[in-house]
Image (spheres, coloured by chain):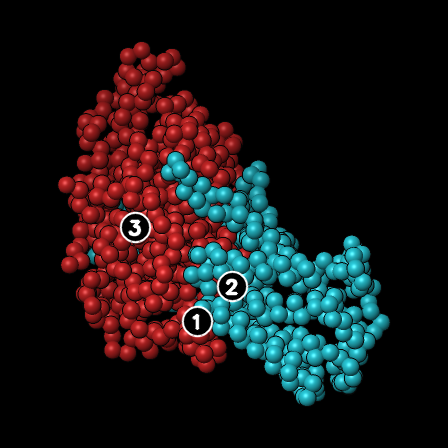
Amino acid sequence: MARWDEPDFYDKDELLSVDWQPPRTPWMKTPVDLRKGTYIYPGKAKNLEALDLPFPHDWSVSDVDWKLPEDWQRIVLEGMAERLKKYRSFKLFMDICVRCGACADKCQFFIGSGDPKNMPVLRAELMRSIYRKDFTAMGRIFGSLAGGRELTEDVIKEWFYYFYQCSECRRCSVFCPYGIDTAEITMMARELLGLLGLYVNWVIEPVANCFRYGNHLGIQPHGLVDTLEFMVDDIEEATGVRVKLPINKKGAEVLFVVPSGDYVALPGVYTCMAYLVILNELDIDYTWSTYASEGGNFGLFTSREMVKRLNAKIYAEAKRLGVKWILGAECGHMWRVFHQYMDTMNGPADFLEVPTSPLTGTVFEHARSTKAVHLMEFLADAIHHGKLKLDPSRNDHIRVTYHDSCNPARAMGIFEEPRYVIRSVCNNFFEMPRNTIREQTFCCGSGAGLGTDENMEMRLRGGMPRGLAVRYVQEEYGVNQLAAMCAIDRATLPTVCDYWAPGVQVTGISELVANAMVLEGEKRRTLNLRLEPIPGMEAEGAPEGADEGADEGADDRPVEVPVAAGVAASVTTGAGAGTDASLEAGATGDA
Amino acid sequence: MKAVLPLVIVAALFLLALLLAPSAIWVFAVWIPYAAITIFVLGMILRVMGWAGSPVPFRIPTTAGQQKSLAWIPRSRLENPHSTPEVIGRMALEVLFFRSLLRNTRTQMARDRHLVYGTSWALWLAALAMHWSLLVILTGHLRLFTQPTPGFVTFVRDLDGVFHVGLPVFHISAVVFVLALAYLLYRRLADRQVHYISLIADYFPLFLLLGIGITGFWMRHVSRTDVRGVKELALGLVHFTPTVPQGIAPLFFAHLFLVSVLLAYFPFSKLVHMAGIFLSPTRNLANTNREIRHVNPWNYAVKVHTYEEYEDEFREKMVGAGLPVEKR
């Protein structure tokens, strides 16, 4: 029997017959329905304590009493006042909305759920109604006639519910005539909830882990070494090449930072293996770091202060190791932090040099201040200059489409680089419909710390627009892989695809690159990085051209690695060995 | 219900002026307009200063096009600006042509269970028509406040009355203005989603503007008012030597009163989006994030977990795993 936190539990027809018509009761008089399957479990006290956050307490969403601190109203209102003074975005976005409704049906959570409070405009009104009541002349005088309402415990519950049903994806902000960005409001709301000790565990536990261990998963340094070594073994089995594994290497030219999801979560693991292959083959003088073993930053889903606290290690480690610049891997919100926050918060990085490609001599002028370059920018430049030896036909069995991840799309604008790279390594690339890609891309439904199991219904609903767009290209063009440049996508889109477009697999772009790369000294490539046979490259009757590789690799270096099926298990074990806090968040009970 | 109260209020304001103006002509012709314009000007200055008083700690443009990165990748200058002129271009498109609203789509579930996102230009068209016709009408009104009338005002008025229908010449802007407002009101009432999110504060300005538009249209085309008298009054107000000429119809004072209410209400309402849009940090910043450091004026030191603390905790394990350490 399928459980309520498993996709099978939910009836597809029921989800598809979503009703977008609002209820008869006005929204201010419609109490929040805290339904299991749609909310995330509370942050545990121990995680708040580990971070010195106020009011750590254990509570449950289904409790009537959330055990708020005594003067919680004062705390919230003072918190709002402080943030209105600190953020023009917050103040302005409280004032200038005209409720035109252009954003209403742009949010994947509204499209998937039909809950009117998931319209970006109403999500923001949950906060604006309090702002009007307590911070505007009209609201003070006319109260509810001016759209104000009292700050009650029910409002706090509503905030908790709906501001953790927003993935801060900024899609609404593209359509808003004033550029109102609900992500800004959601961030403020989460900060205010945090002042009362209210977090979700799926966010605050990774934050606590990241603070202490350097990564969200709580992988300790030796565990990370094990994890990466397992990957090196599997790479050798697939390619016959033993790649170098520089960790915490002082004096390297480049510090390589990845999202930690790629260490353990399938299929991100294959993307991580691909990083090893690519950087080895291009002979980049680089290093991994165990202290800065996470570029992702769940602080972004907590508070701006937490963003800074977690992000500080990146520049600190770059300085300690004496590298020249930073190369960032495929991640979504990590790039929002790198692009929009890192330099402002923890810069200036004047101890680093302007990033220059050792392969092509290209100076990455656009990153001259942060000194952080995106792997796709780096690879697009290298491929453009013919520095990669590629055989795209190895990916001919793949018919791929590309999912723009929210943050790199709408908080950075990196659209062409990943497409150029994909086209260079895959002969069969198909775009999803125009309104579902690029700046109009839909979220996977699990971003901003929503990617856990207990809110599975809401994830499937939020993932519906993306899932149906994938199904469209699957039916139309026979697409069988969805490439995504974000670790949360790689961890959560498999569920979305299994549910909405069964048969479509998820991959990182680097994995496609590494599989298409002709490596120096490789054996005849019959297996891809997943250690699955590559169609058309089977051992017998292999096409010509693969011979040269076979001579060197397979013969000279007999490989001794676990059997193909072992890859997932071995990697998981590798992480588990060094995992203290582990990924238990998903299993934490609420009741 | 939310629409009824604002309608009643605007109707009451209209009747109030219509009935009381003849007996309190100086109040309606001079003091209320002066008070309204004062509230408007001071209110808007305070409003803008209030926003400007809060810093922009982070550079957060919404990027709706290709970034500037590698030289050979064409970038989108207006959707993802990288310089001040490009930002001005993006802002001009937003302010003059409502570029973002033009992206509007309508999500629908097709019969084959696919989501489709149909083009939806009605809101954009109505909003653009309303704002532009209002601008044309306001420009036309400048002839009442200037002597002699500047050339561009005459030009705009000639353009506005290009069809030469009726006497006095029928102005396109007046009709477009009222029709566009009527559509926006209809949409707010008929579209259930928009109706659901609407507040009293969304209907009130619509009725107020409709009242202003209809009274204006009425005076020009139905019951003509003494334009020379109105101009004398307007010039007197502008030069701070107010005089109230005889013979101006009470309907004019109702019109003027509704305008005064609008001006006084403006700084305390959602109408401040007129000024606010210029300050919107997702639109008015260049996406130069990684090239030029953005400074946060309140950036403060936070508690971090240093490498030393990290190594102290894991030194043995690091050594055991063959990792280099700082201290043995």
Residue tagged 3: A458
For the point 49% across and 73% down, which residue is it? B5
For the point 68% across and 88% down, which residue is it? B23
Which quadrant, please, contains the N terminus of chain B? bottom left
Chain assignment, label 2: A
Q: Which chain is red?
A: A
Q: Are marks 2 and 1 in contact (CB under 8 Å)?
A: no
Q: Position of residue A375 (x, y in %)?
A: 43, 41
* Left or right side of B142 for A387: left
| Of callouts 3 and 1, the N-terminal one | 1
Residue tagged 1: A147
Q: Which chain is cyan?
A: B
Residue B45 visible (yes or no): no
Q: Position of residue B250 (x, y in %)?
A: 70, 79
Q: Are marks 2 and 1 on the same chain?
A: yes
- Measured along the vertical axis of the image, is residue A578 above or below residue A33? above
Q: Which mark is residue A98?
A: 2
Q: Residue furthest right?
A: B148
Chain assignment, label 3: A
| Of callouts 2 and 1, the N-terminal one | 2
